[in-house]
Image (spheres, helix red, strand yellow):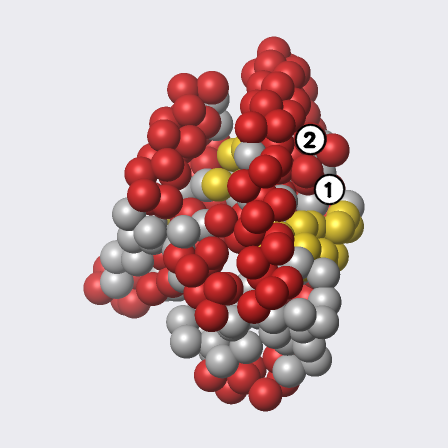
């Protein structure tokens, strides 16, 4: 259900209103069952196919990462929060120095995003190869394993870190009503890192409201366009 958020009569009349989305979790679980089953079958088929087709290119990427920055696995794993708050191991190609997590405190003050999310365009922890694989979104390919396992779907809100979810309010927690995804509305925005945290959350909840096979395929096609145009970090 979509409603207009209110900030107070005097202020609300002068400031453009956000569109807030509120859902009944039980209703989400009951409705669109054919969609959920069909989407899971689609996720399994396409993630398995992609892993087979991309196996050799992914091995080459892993080797290049290891040569450029030895000392850790080319695959970076991290705890993320999935549907209904379930924590799972999230996989990416490593794009940062091996001790990047330990160095996070050194760059926290340079965060370019509001809210609980950390984003920094010229993060000094990113390696030379890391900048390229982020720009081309190659670093996201290991998430095909997460999709095959059922932790993620091809389309859905991006999975958040536990420390980010700890700062969510009731509104943002609704993102966890559905399976997180490899791509979403936010992912295809050319200026995605310039969006506010509230705008990002609204886009994710808009997806939950509008979700359908047609919308999923539209977002998949637009994601391919975004990758070709290098909308990545």
Residue 84 marker = 1
Q: Which residue is mark 2?
A: 148
* Residue 115 visible to an observer of this rendering: no
Q: Nearer the viewer, mark 1 or mark 2?
A: 2
* Residue 16 visible to an observer of this rendering: yes
Question: At numbered mark 2, what does the secondary structure look like: helix, strand or loop?
Answer: helix
For disc 1, the neighbor class at 10 Å (few under 14, some 14 to 19, many from 20) is some
Left/right of residue 138 with respect to residue 224 in the rendered view: right
The residue closer to the viewer here, 68 or 146, is 68
Instruction: Look at 48% across and 32% down and name the residue there.
Output: 209
On screen, 144 above or below 109?
A: above
Instruction: Look at 47% across and 22% down and name the residue there.
Output: 212
Count how many numbered circles sit on residues in the image: 2
- Residue 142 occupies quadrant: top right
Q: Position of residue 70 (x, y in %)?
A: 66, 70
On screen, 52 above or below 231?
A: above
Q: Position of residue 42 (x, y in %)?
A: 58, 19
- Residue 224 occupies quadrant: top left
N-terminal of the pair, mark 1 or mark 2, is 1
Instruction: Look at 59% across and 38% down and name the residue there.
Output: 56
The residue closer to the viewer here, 95 or 223, is 95
Left/right of residue 87 with respect to residue 154 in the rendered view: right
For disc 2, the neighbor class at 10 Å (few under 14, some 14 to 19, many from 20) is many
Question: At numbered mark 1, what does the secondary structure look like: helix, strand or loop?
Answer: helix
Residue placed furthest toward the top: 34
Q: Quadrant of the C terminus?
A: bottom left
The residue closer to the viewer here, 95 or 195, is 95
- Residue 198 occupies quadrant: bottom left
On screen, 77 above or below 2?
A: below
């Amino acid at each position: 259900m979509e409603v207009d958020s209110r900030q107070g009569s005097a202020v609300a009349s002068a400031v453009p209103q956000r569109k807030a989305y509120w859902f009944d979790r039980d209703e989400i679980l009951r409705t669109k069952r054919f969609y959920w089953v069909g989407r899971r079958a689609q996720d399994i088929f396409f993630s398995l196919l992609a892993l087979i087709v991309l196996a050799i290119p992914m091995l080459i990427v892993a080797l290049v990462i290891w040569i450029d920055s030895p000392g850790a696995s080319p695959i970076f794993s991290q705890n993320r929060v999935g549907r209904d708050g379930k924590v799972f191991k999230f996989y990416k190609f490593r794009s940062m120095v091996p001790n990047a997590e330990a160095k996070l405190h050194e760059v926290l003050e340079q965060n370019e995003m509001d809210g609980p999310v950390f984003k920094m365009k010229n993060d000094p922890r990113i390696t030379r190869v890391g900048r390229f694989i982020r720009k081309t979104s190659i670093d996201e390919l290991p998430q095909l394993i997460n999709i095959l396992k059922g932790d993620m779907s091809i389309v859905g809100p991006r999975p958040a870190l536990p420390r980010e979810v700890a700062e969510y309010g009731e509104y943002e927690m609704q993102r966890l009503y559905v399976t997180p995804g490899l791509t979403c509305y936010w992912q295809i925005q050319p200026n995605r890192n310039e969006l506010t945290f509230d705008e990002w959350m609204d886009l994710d909840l808009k997806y939950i409201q509008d979700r359908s096979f047609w919308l999923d395929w539209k977002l998949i096609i637009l994601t391919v366009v975004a990758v070709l145009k290098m909308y990545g970090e």
